[in-house]
Image (cartoon, rainbow, N blue to C red):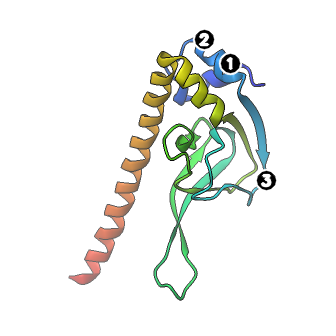
Amino acid sequence: MISANRLKAFEFFRGFGNEQLEQLAVLATEEIYDAGAQVHRSGDTARALFMIEEGKVVLIMDSRLSPHKPPMQVTVDVVTKGDSMGWSAVVEPYAYTLGALCIDRTRIIAIDAAGIRKLMEEDKALGYQIMKAAARVISHRLTHTRIILVGERGLSMKNEY
């Protein structure tokens, strides 16, 4: 079990009460990954919501340019100390939308997905806090992805003129 105080350090839990953090801490475990380790792949069943305590993880997607070539991995975002990943743990269909690859030795707090969803059903106020936090993460990631796409589109358009 992880202490509720460790969870307080994460932006994801901004606005959560001590009792809510205590409920989540019971579901949390520490995981350590070496550089190069894959935390999860796109499409995997979401087993946990992750908080990065130390290290760096790249969130990647496969881009298929041709059916005859292997997919190209595209970095969508980089998560570091204090960030979260794995919002798919609380959003149907409960499957990760991106892969997560450690590029440094990484210490993660993993909060059990099934346990979180059970708490969300039992405690609607906690469920609301979790969904607000997940929506912030999704919004941030979408904004970041748009910036990347606009930048790449701008570069490709520049070559056309």
**Residue marked by disc 3:** 34
**Residue marked by disc 1:** 4
Residue at left offset 56%, top offset 51%: 96
User: How many residues crowd mark 1 within 10 Å: few (<14), some (14–19), many (20+)?
Assistant: some
Instruction: Looking at the image, tell me whether mark 3 or mark 2 is earlier in sequence order.
Output: 2
Residue at left offset 61%, top offset 46%: 46
Farthest residue to the left: give it.
Answer: 161
Q: Is residue 15 visible?
A: no
Query: Residue 113 at what x, y percent from top left?
Result: 63, 36
Image quadrant in which the C terminus is located: bottom left
Tell me whether circle 2 and circle 1 mark residues in contact (CB < 8 Å): yes
State how far apart marks 1 and 3 are (Cα): 25 Å
Total numbered circles: 3
Q: Say if 73 sits above or below 38 in the image.
A: below
Instruction: Specify whether 72 is left or right of 107.
Output: left
Instruction: Looking at the image, tell me whether mark 2 or mark 1 is earlier in sequence order.
Output: 1
**Residue marked by disc 2:** 18
Instruction: Looking at the image, tell me whether mark 1 or mark 3 is earlier in sequence order.
Output: 1
Q: Amino acid at mark 3?
A: Asp
Q: Amino acid at mark 1?
A: Ala
Query: Residue 115 at what x, y percent from top left?
Result: 65, 29
Image quadrant in which the N terminus is located: top right
Q: Amino acid at mark 2?
A: Asn
Tell me whether circle 1 and circle 3 mark residues in contact (CB < 8 Å): no
Query: Hey, which quadrant is residue 7 in on the image?
Result: top right
Residue in the foreground of this view, choosing between 121 and 58: 121
